[in-house]
Image (spheres, rainbow, N blue to C red):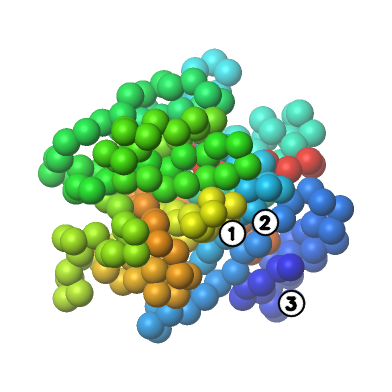
């Protein structure tokens, strides 16, 4: 099923959506993307089915250099007969593009879990961890993750948490004037679905978190980043350009 604001008046986006609509029934991907409006604000989102979709994290290429861009990562995947059907920046990073907090890729912990507050959004406690395991994905509050230490094939730490067990982050203000383009991820209670969201205009933390909780009905959600937020979604005919990124989360499918 394909949803979203796609019209034949935009022939490139319409053709991309048509090709994917023909391709998806073959079982390559269950990815669904669409645009929704909530409280007069627009959001683009992609739902990932962990039972069918190959969801991964990417940071460095085989030579140890950050991938940086969706196009560069997709080109490399193409060489092995695969393609990137969905991608999004997946957490905050240092100037050298390395992850700020915990980062796990294909079972290998490359950066350790970071505890404690800081002045940055990352350190606005509680923050959290997005963990991709075997057939499931979950958002954990950081201290809960540290105690449970679930098995993660991939994991990225970011902050702040947006929704914690159904409650909005306690520091989010309904009347805040701090507005940015923002992106984040929420997970279903059974861990079988991950929903990635990016705002299509600047929003406050409070507005963004309410979209996850009140519109999507998700009890756990994590902020990934703000002004550098980026989305690559073949069903929407969208691939945002911009500055080089650090960690990237994406769905890979046969080409």
Q: Are marks 3 and 2 in contact (CB under 8 Å)?
A: no
User: For the point 31% across and 57% down, which residue is it?
Assistant: 164
Give the spatial CA distance, label 3 vs label 2: 22 Å
Q: Please count the marks in the image.
A: 3
Give the spatial CA distance, label 2 vs label 1: 6 Å
Name the image quarter holding residue 18.
bottom right
Is 74 placed above or below 221 here?
above
Of labels 1 and 3, earlier in sequence is 3
Residue 134 is situated, as x and y percent measured from the top left of the image, at 60, 37
Q: Which residue is mark 1?
A: 47
Residue 148's disc is none
- Closest to the observer, 249 or 157: 157
Q: Which residue is mark 2?
A: 31
**The N terminus is located in which quarter?**
bottom right
Give the spatial CA distance, label 1 vs label 3: 24 Å
User: For the point 71% across and 55% down, which residue is it?
Assistant: 30
In the figure, is residue 59 to the left or right of 5? left
Q: Which residue is mark 3?
A: 8
Pointer 1 local density, CA inside 10 Å: few below 14, some 14–19, many at least 20: many
- Closest to the observer, 131 or 211: 131
Q: Are marks 1 and 3 in contact (CB under 8 Å)?
A: no
Name the image quarter holding residue 202.
bottom left
Q: Are marks 2 and 1 in contact (CB under 8 Å)?
A: yes
Residue 155 is situated, as x and y percent measured from the top left of the image, at 45, 35
In the figure, is residue 142 to the left or right of 42? left
User: For the point 63% across and 48% down, which residue is it?
Assistant: 50
**The C terminus is located in which quarter?**
top right
Secondary structure at badge 2 equals loop
User: For the point 59% across and 59% down, which residue is it?
Assistant: 47
Pointer 2 local density, CA inside 10 Å: few below 14, some 14–19, many at least 20: many
């Amino acid at each position: 099923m394909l949803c979203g604001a796609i019209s034949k008046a935009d022939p490139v986006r319409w053709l991309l959506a048509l090709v994917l609509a023909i391709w998806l029934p073959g079982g390559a991907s269950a990815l669904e993307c669409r645009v929704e409006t909530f409280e007069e604000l627009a959001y683009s989102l992609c739902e990932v089915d962990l039972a069918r979709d190959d969801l991964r994290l990417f940071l460095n290429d085989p030579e140890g250099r950050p991938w940086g861009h969706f196009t560069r990562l997709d080109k490399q995947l193409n060489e092995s007969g695969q393609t990137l059907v969905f991608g999004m920046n997946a957490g905050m990073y240092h100037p050298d593009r390395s992850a700020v907090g915990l980062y796990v890729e294909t079972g290998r912990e490359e950066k350790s879990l970071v505890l404690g507050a800081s002045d940055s959004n990352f350190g606005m406690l509680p923050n959290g961890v997005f963990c991709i395991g075997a057939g499931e994905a979950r958002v954990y509050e950081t201290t809960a993750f540290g105690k449970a230490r679930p098995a993660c094939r991939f994991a990225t730490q970011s902050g702040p948490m947006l929704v914690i067990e159904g409650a909005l982050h306690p520091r989010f203000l309904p009347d805040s004037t701090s507005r940015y383009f923002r992106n984040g991820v929420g997970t279903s209670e059974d861990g079988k679905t991950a929903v990635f969201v990016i705002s299509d205009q600047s929003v406050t933390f409070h507005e963004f978190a309410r979209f996850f909780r009140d519109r999507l009905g998700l009890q756990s959600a994590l902020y990934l980043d703000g002004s550098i937020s980026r989305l690559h979604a073949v069903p929407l005919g969208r691939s945002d350009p911009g500055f080089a990124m650090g960690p990237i989360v994406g769905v890979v499918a046969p080409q």
